[in-house]
Image (cartoon, helix red, strand yellow):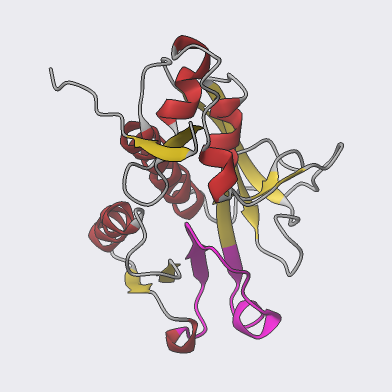
Amino acid sequence: MNIIIYTDSVNSWFVPYGNKLKKALLEQGHSVKYVYKSQELYPCDIMFLLSCTKLLSRKYLQPNKNNIVVHASDLPHGKGFSPMQWQILEGKNQIPITLFEAVEGVDSGPFYLKDMIEFEGHELLNELREKMALKIIQMCLRFVNEYGKLRSQPQIGESSLYKKRMTQDDQLDISKSIASQFNHFRIAHNENHPLYFKYLGHKYYLKIIKESN
C-alpha cells in the first residue's frame, strides 16, 4: 500500500516514534513517506495524521482512501487538546485511546479501534509519551495488517472537549502539598512549559527530573 505518515512539525516529540512506524511499514513491503508540510502531501491509500496540532482541510483528506488519527481519549469524550495530560491531571492512570477516520470536524469521525494505555502512576512526561507512542504504533500497524476487515463505527455518547493548555495551567498552588499536586508534576515539560508558582511578588519556576535506575 501507498502510505503517508503526517506530523505537522518536524520538531514534534512524536517524530522519532513516527520513524519507527515508518520502518516497520517499510519492512512489511509498503511504500511509505514521512511528511511534515501539508504542501508536500499527495493522494495515497492511507494517511496517518499523528501528533498534529492543526486540522487539515478537505482538499488534503478527500483524495485518500483513509485518513487515520489516533487520539488518547474515549471519543466522543475528550476531544481537543492534550487529552492524555488532562486525564493524568484528573488522576487517571488508565487512558483510553481511539483510532478513527479524520473528517473536517474536530475528532468527530467514525472509529475503527479502541484500546487502553496503562500507567503505574510514577511516570513523567517523557515516559507517558513513550507509552502512548508505542500504543499508537501498535494500533496503526494493526489497522494496516487488518485493512479491509475492520468496520468503522459512529461515535456514540456525550461529547466533551479539552481546551488547549495555557501558561496559567502550569501554575502550582503553594498552599497544597507536592504529593497532592504530583500529577501536575508528571505532565510538566521542563523546557517549554515549566511549572511555576508566585510568592512575595515574584515568579519561581520548578523542574522535575527522575533519578535514573
Q: Position of residue 198 (x, y in %)?
A: 49, 34
11, above or below 89, in the image: below
Q: Residue furthest left?
A: 213
Residue 45 among those drawn in magenta: yes
Residue 213 relative to residue 122: left or right: left
Q: Which residue lies furthest to the front in this view?
A: 200
The stretch of residues the image draws in magenta is: 41-67
Q: Quadrant of the C terminus?
A: top left
Q: Which residue lies furthest to the bottom in this view?
A: 39
Q: Where is residue 171 in the image (x, y as percent from the top left)?
A: 53, 36
Residue at x 53%, y 55% (from the top left corner)? 147
Residue 142 among those drawn in magenta: no
32, above or below 157, in the image: below
Residue at x 43%, y 80% (from the top left corner)? 37
Residue 96 relative to residue 179: left or right: right
Q: Is residue 178 visible?
A: yes
Q: In which quarter of the image is the N terminus?
A: bottom left
Residue 123 relative to residue 169: left or right: left
**Total number of numbered labels?**
0
Residue 128 relative to residue 55: left or right: left
Which picture quadrant has residue 133?
A: top left
Which picture quadrant has residue 194?
A: top left
Q: Is the stretch drawn in magenta largely helix, strand or loop?
A: loop
Q: Position of residue 163 (x, y in %)?
A: 68, 49
Residue at x 54%, y 14% (from the top left corner)? 176
Q: Position of residue 45 (x, y in %)?
A: 51, 73
Which picture quadrant has residue 135?
A: top left
